[in-house]
Image (tube, rainbow, N blue to C red):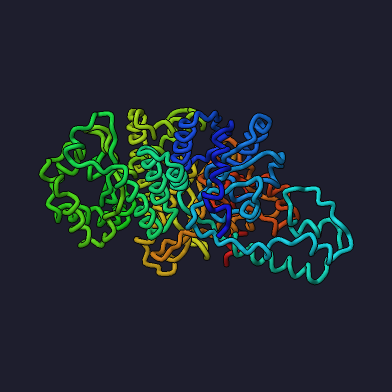
Amino acid sequence: MYQHTLFGAYINAIILLLLQRVLLLVASDVDALCACKILQALFQCDHVQYTLVPVAGWQELETAFLEHKDQFKYFVFINCGANVDLLEILQPEEDTFFFICDSHRPINVVNVYNDTQIKLLVKQDDDLDVPAYDDIFRDEEDEEEDSEDESDGSEPSEKRRRFEEVCCTGRKVTLQMWLFLHFRREILFDYEQYEYHGTSSAMVMFDLAWIMSKDLNDMLWWAIVGLTDQWVQDKITQMKYVTDIGILQRHVSRHNHRNEDEENSLSIDCMRIAFEYDLRLALYQHWSLYESLCNTSYTSASLKLWSVQGQKRLQEFLADMGLPLKQVKQKFNSMDVSLKENLREMIEESANKFGMKDLRVQTFSIHFGFKNKFSASDIVYATTSLMENIEKEDSETTNFIKALDSLSRGNLDKLHQGLDLAKKQLRAIQQTVASCICTNLVISQGPFLYCSLMEGTPDVKLFSKPVSLCLLSKYLLKSFVCSTKNKRCKLLPLVMAAPMDVEQGTVIMVGIPPEVESSDKKNFFGRAFEKARGPQGAVLPAGPGRCCPAGSVHASSTDSPGGLSPASKRCLPAQKPQTIIELKTEDRSKFLDALISLLS
């Protein structure tokens, strides 16, 4: 067990944090927003002064740090920063401290083993699978035995120095040193080759609040939404989701233990969270059942709704349930009460006959007063749509603040606005999926499938946003696997491209792992993209508007002395996964050729 993974080891430091002015650097994803809301509530309890800065890429994070480093000594990174060597890149003063709450894996090994300036907030039962300390770091005394040259040891943070730094100082490299470097590279390659996600940052923050006896029902709801975001975005396995649901369910029982009579007497301003088995249908309680069935990835792919035969199967599915078309096409709230009472059981029974055995899911819902009820997934879709809203020419920061505000129960108007945007987003995704499959835009490139959206495609501007493009790619791959008869293609990953900025001539590309039941949700495209773009880095530097949801496999110290080459530093994102990259349009063909050669 690593000391930094234990909350108990950091409680004193965290209490000290609550007495300081703090800079919050928050990534642009729903889990990060929920974690931020919990931390804001904790700060409010203790009257802590803080400044909130949304970061959409490495350059924004670096700029924010440089602008504020003289005013702040305590920095909190939420869903960003864990996967890069922050001390190496930001070069902070010795009295500067970084608190990192990041669900993205793998965590940079320097951040893991630094116990002075970096405090990682990780759940105790999270297995980081970090290499052993002695396998990747080397005592200065050991180095001195291998070479007569002596180091001045001027860097206080380098109790043990990375071995590549020894090589670039011109010191003589012995066989023992060479072997150490060789095995270290192999170990770090194995550790860093896949991107994946650990426990939701919102859950980690809620655990912190609970340990400090400051947890509230609002905080618990934000933790639930953060976990649900990971599930909706397909970032974690079903087993991980169910396990974390069980953990949160115990807290829900503790905070929401009133009986029915007490619930009916509550004021309209109160909130109540309930665990339930719900339908895996997007926004169906705020939409029509028909629209939800057509625009939910799971049902659309299972029924193959892009085809005439699929539409017939949908009609048969509705007929099997005994639901009149008039009822399912009107708003859910307007359906006959007699139908709604047994709707879940009716749908589950018929879904099993049509091969949809996973239509029921464990989740939570929230009641605001007497009439406002939302499921956790409703909040995720609404908040995501507000963050990536393209209908207004608002800045990224403005959209971030609107999305953050929508998580407060006093801002139901913004939440309903987000629900309307989410419906448009889901329609656009399903229409694009149908178009790609019907026009055979998904082609095999040998080791992977490839699909490219052209300029002029309906709603193509929406898919210049990373979360929307990821959702589209995952929905498309799921639908393609259901539609193709080619057994080999069913096992292939997908690379998808869409126009990013027409004026600058850029495209955004994403890599999605294969759609298989046993998937561990680990993505190998980060390393593959990194190598395919070459040492010069065809990828543009992350900047304003280039926001992607957290976690990257970075160019580590195994690739160049001292960590990163200048080109790699220029391209390094703060929380954008390397599985999402931005390229010049003219570089796309060259990049794809390199990727095919690499993966063949």
Q: Residue 386 lies in what quarter of the image?
A: top left
Q: Is residue 469 visible?
A: no
Q: Between 429 and 193, which is closer to the camera in this rendering?
A: 193
Q: Tell me which residue sits at (44%, 38%) in the image.
A: 38
- Quarter of the image where the N terminus is located: bottom right
Compared to residue 282, the image places residue 404 above or below, namely above
Residue 446 percent location from the top left of the image: 52, 65
Q: Tell me which residue sits at (76%, 59%) in the image.
A: 164
Q: Tell me which residue sits at (48%, 42%) in the image.
A: 32
Q: Between 381 and 247, which is closer to the camera in this rendering?
A: 247
Compared to residue 401, the image places residue 193 above or below, namely below
Residue 489 percent location from the top left of the image: 44, 65
Residue 544 percent location from the top left of the image: 58, 35
Compared to residue 67, the image places residue 85 above or below, namely below
Q: Between 324 and 348, which is closer to the camera in this rendering?
A: 348
- Quarter of the image where the C terminus is located: bottom right
Farthest residue, direction right = 148
- Left/right placement of residue 428 relative to residue 44 reads left
Residue 39 percent location from the top left of the image: 48, 37
- Left/right placement of residue 59 relative to residue 125 reads right
